[in-house]
Image (cartoon, grey):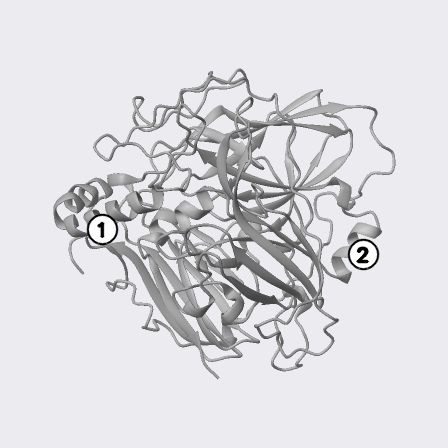
């Protein structure tokens, strides 16, 4: 391998070595900015003119250069109510063009049609004119709430001017419906066309019993655009939403009063955005595109620093880092979290947390108990990040993202979940099940590479056999960048981080494993139910768009 270079060297070399690529990308950005409603700044400066009033509760996280990434619009935080994305409702059946998994016990499918289209939204208070791209014209998109063994057949209709494809992140789906154009290009949705995606909403099939592994049934997934070269821009413009699943086990926890009822079960997606003086979104990674795009306005469920009225009871929050490049470490101004789920899956038992770090695409399913809380509680981001490459250290009190306004008397019949409460059983992958070890080194050599090779969608970099388990080792050799690694199709189980056992909350099932500079993770992964081609990649969306990705094929 060539000498490892630092991030700054990489950007410097890119100006000379990647000249042709820069011209191509510049032309691409220019093309995409026509008729999209995205405001872009000059390539010569890469500056954002946006400025807004300082936060009143805590110091804001400053961008890398105090002259950059500024928003000129001033607003008062916590003047907009937190919106709860509407639940997507099924519609009439249609003749679909995708295959459901061959699994016994499936009920009749439900049919959904989602229109991808431009709309306007009031992200910054008093500015309802911001152009977004939304599923059903909403930012974020509508929330799917689906049941185990009840397939969802979703027709996505593209009313935008760019190609799209939809990935159900954390889903256990066929290659056709997984949503990766690199390995299934026929599922790309050109403008004015539609494609169907079949989600079985099943757990993986145990090859020994031919029954579903209920211990691996998911709970908190999300869907988002996954169009190669355009994922960062398309997600930034609004193409993301929650996909929540329930089975009899989880329903029993809710109906039995262990977990809060659905009315107190709130999805939260955290993002950061940049706006111009006309309140239009600005997206222009420019020469910093290998780092990732950071915003200076913090957005929760599509609103800049909103508030949320809560009762004095326990609430369940599905927290998602939906940003392009920004990491978060979330902490409450009063109280702590009780974590009940990690990424897509419920944990075996509830774990108390004083703060929770979320890399790109990671999720944390948590309980917050407001019964003895003060009248105001802030959800703060205490992680400082000046560049898209990687976060800095913790700084307190941090930046308040969401204000909870607490009122009323404490309820007497609240959810009973506490630290240690049993949730979903966990079935570990045993070392004796491992049939193959593979090592993947994520690095840069003037381009993003994995094992010294640039991404080629025609090449398989692994061919695991169906119904077997493998050990995959992810190594970050990329200078001072961080890389959250996301394999599609299956959960993986972290065995070691830098040679040590992971924290208990990361010891079970994951779909995204964060790698800081020089980190190494050893994970076990079992390939079940489906054969076909899939991808794994860094979930910093600018890294993903610049091909920090590899393909694998599950073979019979």
- Mark 1 burial class by Cα count in 10 Å: few <14, some 14-19, many 20+: few
Residue at horizontal 78%, vertical 56%? 251
Q: Is residue 467 above or below residue 314?
A: below
Report the residue marked by disc 1: 24
N-terminal of the pair, mark 1 or mark 2, is 1
Quadrant the N terminus occupies: bottom left
Residue 537 spot, x, y in % from top left: 39, 58
Left or right: 136, with 368 as reference point: left
Q: Quadrant of residue 280?
A: top left
Q: Is residue 91 above or below residue 18?
A: below
Q: In the depicted view, which residue is nearer to us: 555 or 440?
A: 555
Q: Is residue 322 visible?
A: yes
Residue at the bottom extreme, as displayed: 556
Residue 355 spot, x, y in % from top left: 55, 36
Q: In the depicted view, which residue is nearer to us: 109 or 346?
A: 109
Q: Nearer the viewer, mark 1 or mark 2?
A: 1
Residue at the right extreme, as displayed: 412
Residue at horizontal 74%, vertical 76%? 105
Q: Is residue 52 above or below residue 348?
A: above
Q: In the depicted view, which residue is nearer to us: 189 or 331?
A: 189
Secondary structure under the numbered disc 1 in the rendered image: helix
Report the residue marked by disc 2: 252
């Amino acid at each position: 391998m060539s000498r490892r270079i630092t991030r700054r060297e990489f950007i410097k070399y890119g100006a000379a070595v990647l000249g042709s690529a820069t011209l191509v990308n510049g032309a691409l950005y220019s093309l995409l900015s026509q008729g999209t409603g995205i405001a872009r700044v000059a390539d010569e400066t890469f500056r954002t003119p946006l400025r807004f009033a300082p936060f009143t509760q805590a110091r804001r996280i400053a961008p890398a250069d105090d002259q950059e990434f500024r928003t000129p619009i001033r607003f008062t935080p916590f003047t907009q109510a937190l919106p709860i994305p509407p639940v997507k409702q099924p519609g009439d059946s249609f003749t679909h063009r995708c295959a459901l998994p061959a699994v016994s016990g499936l009920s009749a499918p439900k049919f959904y049609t989602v229109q991808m289209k431009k709309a306007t939204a009031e992200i910054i208070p008093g500015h309802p004119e911001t152009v977004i791209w939304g599923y059903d014209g909403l930012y974020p998109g509508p929330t799917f709430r689906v049941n185990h063994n009840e397939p969802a057949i979703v027709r996505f209709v593209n009313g935008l001017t760019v190609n799209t494809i939809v990935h159900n992140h954390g889903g256990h789906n066929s290659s056709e419906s997984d949503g990766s154009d690199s390995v299934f290009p026929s599922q790309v949705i050109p403008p004015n066309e539609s494609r169907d995606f079949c989600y079985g909403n099943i757990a993986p099939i145990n090859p020994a019993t031919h029954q579903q592994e209920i211990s691996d049934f998911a709970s908190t997934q999300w869907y988002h655009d996954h169009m190669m070269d355009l994922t960062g821009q398309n997600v930034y413009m609004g193409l993301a939403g929650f996909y929540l699943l329930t089975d009899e086990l989880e329903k029993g926890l809710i109906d039995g009063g262990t977990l809060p009822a659905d009315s107190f079960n709130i999805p939260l997606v955290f993002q950061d955005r940049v706006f111009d003086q006309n309140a239009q979104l600005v997206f222009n990674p420019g020469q910093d595109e290998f780092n990732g795009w950071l915003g200076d306005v913090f957005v929760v469920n599509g609103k800049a620093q909103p508030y949320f009225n809560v009762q004095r009871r326990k609430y369940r929050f599905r927290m998602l880092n939906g940003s392009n490049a920004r990491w978060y470490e979330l902490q409450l101004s009063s109280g702590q979290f009780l974590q009940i789920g990690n990424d897509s899956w419920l944990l075996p038992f509830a774990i108390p947390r004083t703060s929770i770090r979320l890399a790109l695409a990671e999720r944390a399913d948590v309980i917050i108990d407001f019964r003895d809380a003060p009248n105001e509680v802030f959800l703060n981001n205490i992680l400082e990040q000046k560049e898209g490459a990687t976060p800095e250290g913790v700084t307190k009190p941090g930046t308040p993202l969401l204000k909870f306004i607490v009122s009323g008397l404490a309820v007497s019949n609240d959810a009973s979940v506490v630290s240690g409460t049993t949730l979903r059983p966990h079935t570990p992958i045993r070392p004796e099940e491992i049939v193959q070890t593979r090592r993947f080194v994520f690095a840069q050599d003037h381009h993003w590479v994995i094992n010294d090779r640039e991404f080629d969608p025609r090449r398989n970099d692994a061919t695991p056999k169906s119904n077997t388990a493998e050990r995959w080792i992810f190594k970050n050799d990329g200078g001072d960048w961080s890389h959250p690694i996301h394999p599609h199709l299956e959960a993986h189980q972290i065995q070691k981080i830098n040679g040590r056992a992971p924290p208990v909350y990361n010891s079970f099932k994951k779909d995204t494993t964060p790698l800081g500079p020089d980190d190494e993770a050893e994970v076990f992964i079992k390939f079940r139910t489906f054969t076909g081609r899939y991808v794994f990649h860094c979930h910093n969306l600018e890294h993903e768009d610049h091909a920090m990705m590899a393909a694998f094929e599950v073979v019979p």
